[in-house]
Image (cartoon, grey):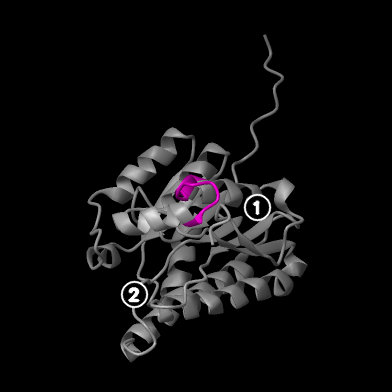
């Protein structure tokens, strides 16, 4: 009997930055997209996790890649210090050599160390802007220079935040990220690429204290904390053909938290 079924269409490729922990938002997005038919390349930087309270998750990259493969995705994990201005081009070079052209770029990486207006150091301020703003610009620039996909299929989504008080360099650098991403919606328009920023609100990925969890639940109409999956569902929609008309937006996906 002759098989008359059409061959399966190739899976598009998403590059997701900041996928260093299984519990993180980046990993949640990767799992959702893999289940939705995307191949996944992702970056991680273990030294960042090591200096944070939660510490490094040993073997995380391999475990995440195995999970994505079980969902049907071909994967590539790239360890990269995005504070290095040469890293974005190197990441794209490696991903393209292993998996091909990137259809969607999802920026989920960050530098986030609490400090306020009076106690932030110049070194910390500069590192936040280097990782959260400059690296994001360079990644979007590389993406825009290399994208050759069908008009209307390209996507950029960046995760942002409205933190300010007590988290000055993080919030300020995320504000810069917003402007860079929204500029991409216009400057990459000729490529048919959409670009949006998503503010997921407070998502518990292991960094919250019990007191903070209680206060956030009380301030959220739905009475619960956000999850990586909540953010992942919105990103999945924005990357889909159905999400094409959403462009140049700063979207709040936070359960209505105050």
* SS class, disc 2: loop
Magenta-span inclusion, residue 221: yes
x, y percent for residue 7:
66, 30
- Between 62 and 30, the residue placed more toward the observer is 30
* Residue at x-position 67% and y-position 47%: 240
Main secondary structure along the magenta-highlighted residues: loop
Question: What are the residue bounds of the magenta stretch?
Answer: 219-229
In the rendered image of this protein, does residue 118 appear above or below residue 228?
A: below
x, y percent for residue 237:
64, 47
Checking the image for residue 188, the label placed there is none
Which residue was labeled with disc 2? 114
x, y percent for residue 216:
43, 57
x, y percent for residue 149:
68, 56
Q: CA distance from mark 1 to mark 2?
A: 30 Å
Which residue was labeled with disc 1? 238
| Whether residue 121 can be seen here | yes
């Amino acid at each position: 009997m002759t098989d008359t079924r059409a061959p399966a269409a190739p899976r598009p490729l998403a590059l997701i930055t900041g996928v260093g922990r299984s519990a993180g938002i980046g990993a949640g997005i990767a799992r959702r997209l893999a289940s939705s038919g995307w191949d996944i390349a992702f970056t991680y930087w273990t030294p960042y996790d090591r200096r944070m309270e939660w510490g490094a998750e040993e073997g995380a990259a391999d475990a995440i890649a195995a999970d994505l493969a079980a969902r049907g995705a071909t994967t590539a994990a790239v360890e990269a210090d995005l504070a290095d201005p040469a890293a974005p081009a190197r990441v794209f070079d490696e991903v393209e050599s292993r998996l091909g052209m990137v259809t969607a770029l999802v920026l989920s990486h960050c530098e986030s160390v609490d400090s306020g207006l009076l106690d932030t150091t110049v070194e910390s301020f500069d590192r936040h802007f280097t990782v959260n703003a400059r690296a994001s610009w360079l990644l979007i620039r590389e993406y825009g220079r290399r994208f050759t996909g069908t008009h209307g299929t390209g996507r950029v989504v960046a995760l942002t935040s409205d933190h300010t008080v007590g988290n000055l360099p993080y919030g300020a650098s995320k504000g810069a990220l917003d402007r860079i991403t929204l500029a991409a919606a216009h400057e990459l328009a000729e490529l048919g690429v959409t670009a949006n920023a998503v503010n997921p609100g407070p998502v518990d990925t292991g960094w919250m204290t019990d007191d903070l969890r209680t206060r956030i639940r009380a301030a959220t109409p739905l009475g619960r904390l956000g999850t990586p999956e909540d953010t992942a569902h919105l990103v999945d929609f924005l990357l889909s053909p159905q999400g094409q008309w959403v462009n140049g937006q700063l979207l709040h996906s936070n359960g209505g938290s105050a």
